[in-house]
């Protein structure tokens, strides 16, 4: 099934907004220098550890690709590590200066590294939601009364809502970094005895926890949780991050920690596919999954890209054994 021509036109217009370049590192743009660069949310040094010939596997997230897959089926395809998880949201100077403690030294999940990972994921979320709202608004301004454009009104309102919820914790993170108060970011670190196979980075507003209980209502002032599924010392490792004293976020993370250890790797993978847009995997791991497992994970992505999707309370309940990575350590910080 082909994509209608008018939807191709929309996708081309929509794509422009995700190419807009602006450094979001500081409110005072006078501190910026150099061009805005395509900053990685998952660093190249991390991606190279699971890449084959410079490529990883990921489900495409560009608008036209999503439109096609809604008609033909969702699938994972190769993407170069130079292109995966890149956004035009930092100038060269800020990207280098701010994230050198993450990019230029081994990942140990130090307090500074955790704070920077959380901040970068929040900036990425803000950039994406603002680009979505600007794109939807441009469509509405052309012919607001066209009944076919109800979806753009929904996207615009949903994106503005997400931006409103994100503004306060993002500004708080800017203050914490400026004062080097890295300890204000709390975390759960899980280290696995297995080489990395899946990588993901982002923040999200959890609806339900790993015990199938409602965490928060989206109409309230929402809590954000960061997820960073990466590599540390050559082994898979995962960090959940949140602002300390956020009891909603901490409660969500504690339901993950309370699950049986043999389920944690699979639940981490499941959470990444359910909530984190910037998720990729190695060829070996993906091709080693049975078809029902691939189908279940791809269905998570398909639902997340549907305007009609309403998450089930069991969206993060243990279902399938996606990964057999023994837990070495699990610690709150």
Image (cartoon, rainbow, N blue to C red):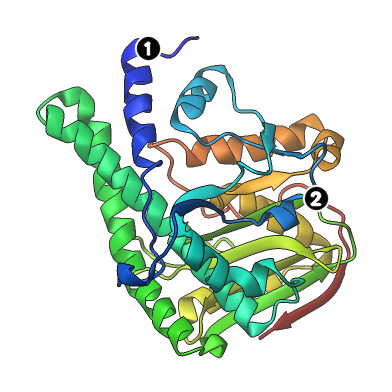
Q: Residue at x 58, y 48 (%)?
A: 85
In the rendered image, which quarter contains the C terminus? bottom right
View extreme (left): residue: 145
Residue designated by label 2: 197
Q: In terms of image quadrants, where is residue 116?
A: bottom right
Q: Position of residue 212 (x, y in %)?
A: 57, 60
Q: Is residue 312 visible?
A: no
Q: Is residue 163 left or right of residue 123?
A: left
Task: Identify the residue at horizontal 44%, vertical 35% (top origin).
Answer: 306
For label 1, the crowd category at 10 Å Cα-Cα, with few meaning under 14, some 14 to 19 and many 20 or more, is: few
Residue 231: x %, y % from top left: 78, 62
Residue at (47% x, 10% y) in the render: 2
For label 2, the crowd category at 10 Å Cα-Cα, with few meaning under 14, some 14 to 19 and many 20 or more, is many
Q: Is residue 82 above or below residue 79?
A: below
Count of number-bearing discs: 2
Judging by the rendered image, the residue that carries numbered circle 1 is: 4
Q: Hey, which residue is sitting farthest front in the picture?
A: 34
Q: Say which residue appears at 32% left-offset and 24% top-offset.
A: 10
Q: CA distance from mark 2 to mark 1?
A: 37 Å
Q: Position of residue 248 (x, y in %)?
A: 47, 76
Q: Are marks 2 and 1 in contact (CB under 8 Å)?
A: no
Residue placed most toward the observer, 151 or 4: 4
**Camera-side residue of 277 and 306:** 277
What is the number of the mark on residue 288?
none
Percent from the top left, x then y, of residue 104?
A: 70, 69
> Is residue 119 shown above or below 236?
below
**SS assignment at label 1:** loop
Q: Is residue 176 left or right of residue 140?
A: right
Task: Indicate which disc, 2 or 1, sits on the residue closer to the N terminus.
Answer: 1
Q: Is residue 232 visible?
A: yes
SS at mark 2 in the image: loop
């Amino acid at each position: 099934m082909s994509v209608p021509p008018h939807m191709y036109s929309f996708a081309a217009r929509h794509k422009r907004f995700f190419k807009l370049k602006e450094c979001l590192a500081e409110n005072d743009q006078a501190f910026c220098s150099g061009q805005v660069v395509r900053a990685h949310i998952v660093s190249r040094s991390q991606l190279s550890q699971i890449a084959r010939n410079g490529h990883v596997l990921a489900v495409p997230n560009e608008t036209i690709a999503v439109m096609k897959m809604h008609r033909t089926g969702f699938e994972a395809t190769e993407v170069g590590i130079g292109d995966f998880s890149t956004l035009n949201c930092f100038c060269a100077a800020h990207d280098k200066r701010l994230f050198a403690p993450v990019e230029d030294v081994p990942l140990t999940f130090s307090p500074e590294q955790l704070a920077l990972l959380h901040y970068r994921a929040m900036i990425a979320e803000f950039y994406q939601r603002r680009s979505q709202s600007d794109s939807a608004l441009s469509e509405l301004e052309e012919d607001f009364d066209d009944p076919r454009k109800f979806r753009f009104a929904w996207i615009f309102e949903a994106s503005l809502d997400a931006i409103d919820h994100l503004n306060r914790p993002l500004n708080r993170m800017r203050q914490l970094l400026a004062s080097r108060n890295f300890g204000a970011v709390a975390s759960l670190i899980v280290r696995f005895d297995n080489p990395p196979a899946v990588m993901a980075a982002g923040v999200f507003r959890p609806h339900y926890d790993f015990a199938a209980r409602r965490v928060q209502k989206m109409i309230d002032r929402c809590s954000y949780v960061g997820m960073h599924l990466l590599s540390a010392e050559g082994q898979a490792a995962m960090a959940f991050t949140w602002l300390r004293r956020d009891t909603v976020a901490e409660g969500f993370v504690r339901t993950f920690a309370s699950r049986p250890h043999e389920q944690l790797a699979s639940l981490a993978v499941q959470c990444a596919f359910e909530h984190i847009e910037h998720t990729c995997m190695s060829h070996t791991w993906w091709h080693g999954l049975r078809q029902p497992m691939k189908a279940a994970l791809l269905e998570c992505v398909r639902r997340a890209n549907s305007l009609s999707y309403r998450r089930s309370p069991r969206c993060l309940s243990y279902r399938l054994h996606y990964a057999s990575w023994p837990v070495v350590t699990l610690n709150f910080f």
